[in-house]
Amino acid sequence: MPIPVWEMYTPHPPTAGRNDKHPVSILWQDGRCTQSMITWYGAKKHEYRLTRFGRDFPFLNADMVGDLLVLVPKSIDEFIAYVLDYDEDIEELQSALGVEAFQNWGVYRNGAAIIETEDECVERLIRNRAAACEHFPSGEEFSEATLDIMNTCLTKFGELPSDAALLRALQTEYQLFQSVERVVCQNLIAGRLFKNIDEFTQAALTILNRRKARAGRSFENHVEHLLKLAGIPHKMRPSLGNDGRPDILIPSEAAYWDKGWPESQLFVVGLKTTCKDRWRQVLNEGRRLKTKYILTLQQGITGNQLREMQQAGVLLVVPEPLHEKYPKSWQPFLLNVAGFIETVKRHLAA
């Protein structure tokens, strides 16, 4: 079942990590009525399925591949269904209704196709999520909701290169955060009379601090998602005692402390949304390793600063679309996210 129009056939949104069932009654063209089930599979997959048609159901066999299924909703619980197998029948239906089945699925109302672009779908789901918020979700909840939205609306999100996927996820989560902030803060502040300037300042600081914390946590969450997709073992923010607390340690703390573990299979990664002034922090993290990595969203650094990093054994990982912001002479020395992931996988497999 098409995910972008789930509200037409189930009350359950496409939420990752859970499965939900919605019973429906379907009257078919031969007069039979099935008590079927629309199930959202979000625990291991990401799809809606229509199942439970009963025994001897004539419209579910290998010979029906390529036929056209028409579902007419009477309500969210009740449908009328037709399966058309002859080209003439399909063409006649399309002509009578003034519609055209131009993709794998389509939604029509009064003969007009209801077409929603991917961006419109994202904006709609962001509005819906924000409207339901009475308080701020956690950073993890924001990131999970963002991935749900993109998997629902972007048909090829799972096929995007790591660099593009990371930037799109961060952009979408920022839009979601802004929408939630408007809803929640509006409810807290609108019409409120502050007792004094200190109370007003405190409210403003709370909003500003939340914004700062959100950006860093969002970056961490989506980078970790990419590592999981790539099957790279890692530990987020491990405590290494005197060796600091790096943002990411690959593959594990046990490997780091194992003196027999080759250094070529260990990676310490700092995550910095900006790193012009803070890149030196990574030098004190994971002291065992001479080479450190910083994955950053920094839009440009001077050649002198890049030279300092190189001399200190720091390699920069920058999403590919941001490479053009850096001095041309230094761009060949930058890793992109996909390149970093492949480097790690190659070294771990050696």
Image (tube, rainbow, N blue to C red):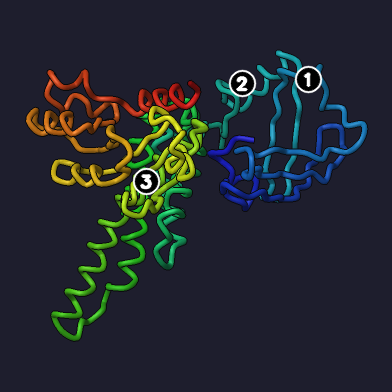
For marks 1 and 2 on the same chain, the one whose residue lies earlier in the sequence: 1
Q: Amino acid at mark 2?
A: Ser
Within-10-Å neighbours for mark 2: few <14, some 14–19, many 20+: few
Choose top left, top right, bottom left or bottom right for residue 197: bottom left
Q: SS for tag 3?
A: helix
Q: Position of residue 343 (x, y in %)?
A: 39, 23
CA–CA distance between discs 3 and 2? Answer: 52 Å
Q: Which residue carries the number 2 mark?
A: 95
SS under mark 1: helix
Residue 336 is situated, as x and y percent measured from the top left of the image, at 31, 26
**Which of the two labelled residues, at mark 3 and mark 2, occupies the earlier sequence position?**
2
Q: Which residue is mark 3?
A: 220
In the image, which disc is placed on residue 64? 1
Q: Which residue: 33% across, 39% down?
A: 288
Q: Position of residue 91 (x, y in %)?
A: 66, 17
Q: Earlier in the sequence, mark 1 or mark 3?
A: 1
Left/right placement of residue 290 relative to residue 152 reads left
